[in-house]
Amino acid sequence: MSTRTASDSNDPIVESRDQLAAPMIKGEKPKDRWRIGTEHEKFVYRTADHRAPSYDEPGGIHDLLMALTRFGWEPVIEGGKVIALAGSDGTVSLEPAGQLELSGAPVENLHQTCAETGRHLKQVKEVGAELGLGFLGLGMWPDKTRAELPIMPKGRYKIMLDHMPRVGTMGLDMMLRTCTIQTNLDYSSEADMVQKFRVSLALQPFATALFASSPFTEGKPNGYMSYRSHIWTDTDPARTGMLPFVFEDGFGYDRYVDYMLDVPMYFVFRDGKYIDAAGQSFRDFLKGELPALPGEKPYLSDWNDHLSTAFPEVRLKSFLEMRGADGGPWNRICALPALWVGLLYDQGALDAAWDLVKNWSIEEQQALRDAVPSEGLDAPAPGGGTVGELATQVLDIAAAGLAARAEVNSMGDNEVGFLEPLRQIVKRGRSPAHDLLDRYEGAWGGDLSKIYDELSF
């Protein structure tokens, strides 16, 4: 989630809804300026006892952040606490229970993405070894209860933690117990955004199935391949889901603005502090009638903050965010952007992907989204067959798109190889969650603590 530490009082005040499409229009870029942004989260644990460390304890999250400054990262302060780091590779930030996230810098190709990921993981492993900390790439804490997890000192998180139980049963699980990999991609025009939004939204369940790695809750199998994805089905219905209106005639920036105006607010940021506005309406804010700030109208920065508080399967800000994948190890961190760049950044591949999904009804798309968390690759796909069977075709389209980009490294390799971990998953017909369950029932003998020995970064 985004990190802000200063009020943007020099921003223009939003006087009319016409200004609200500005961040999306500003995101339009010619193809030669398209970039790739990759975000990935990981769980932090004590190697001695697998406990999740608190922020303030010796060798805890604060000490982890400060130790990373040796690599050139600059501390970001909120309320006197270091809550993030800024540097040339993007931002290192904290999720609510101390999950460590790298929001990578915008880069030109997947070789740079993977190099950036490798640098980050090398740094955290070096520091972790000194502090007695390990890092786990999964979609959900496999063994922790909510009560066992710490809370990080970020103002927006307190507001969200208070609000979540009012609107769903699993919002606290989303905040405290899950990790994801995300990819952020550009568009050239409103029409390009619409096509990319539709393709990526329809195919998001495929990413969920391929990356599913959250089959355990509190030490036992939970009946799901991606319990993380299931959690989103009862987090907050006003700000999550598949967004059927994206497929309606006339969809564009203005319709997305309407959607965001209907999403209830969380907060307003003023003078370095988060003001609780949970459940209040941005429409009232535009009229100067927000109960949290009576008489004030929003700055454009307030709208940008609000755009970051919706959590659909694909999210639009000044770029498109792919949000369907569970957290995972290094090779899958590189594979997720490869999947979406291959599908969306070459027009031939984008058209082929659209041909694949354009006749799927809204009901079929929702049925797919509903089935994938529990059934994974075995979920039935629209038009017949399974997700696993159709995934071969999806990966072929992505590979063709990557080949057409012809982005090669110093060895002459193009980007297609980054899809190989996904090819292997499809070839075996088994998601990462299947493999975890096999180990749990076999070699681990039901002892889930073995996961720390075998799957740490």
Image (cartoon, rainbow, N blue to C red):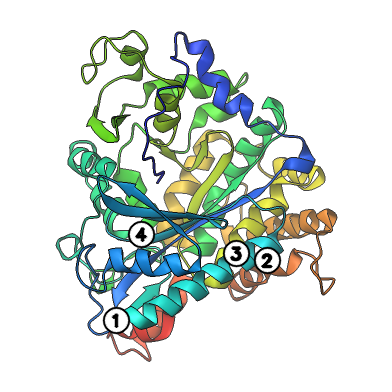
In front here: 59 or 405?
Answer: 59
The answer to whether residue 53 is above or below residue 436 is above
Q: CA distance from mark 1 to mark 3?
A: 31 Å
Tell me which numbered mark, 1 or 4, is placed earlier along the sequence: 4
Q: Earlier in the sequence, mark 2 or mark 4?
A: 4
The residue that mark 2 highlights is 419
Of 244 and 141, the residue lying toward us: 141
**SS at circle 4:** helix
Q: Are marks 1 and 4 in contact (CB under 8 Å)?
A: no
- Give the Cα distance between marks 3 and 2: 17 Å
Q: Residues within 10 Å of mark 4 (few under 14, many from 20)?
A: many
| Alpha carbon separation for disc pair 4 and 3 | 28 Å
What's the amino acid at mark 1? Leu
The numbered mark, 3 or 2, whose residue comes first in the sequence reads: 3
How far across and down, in percent of the image, does residue 381 sit?
57, 52
The residue at which mark 3 appears reads as 116
Residue 457 seen anywhere in this rendered image of the structure: no
Closer to the camera: disc 3 or disc 2? 3
| Element type at mark 3 | helix
Q: Mark 1 — residue?
A: 448
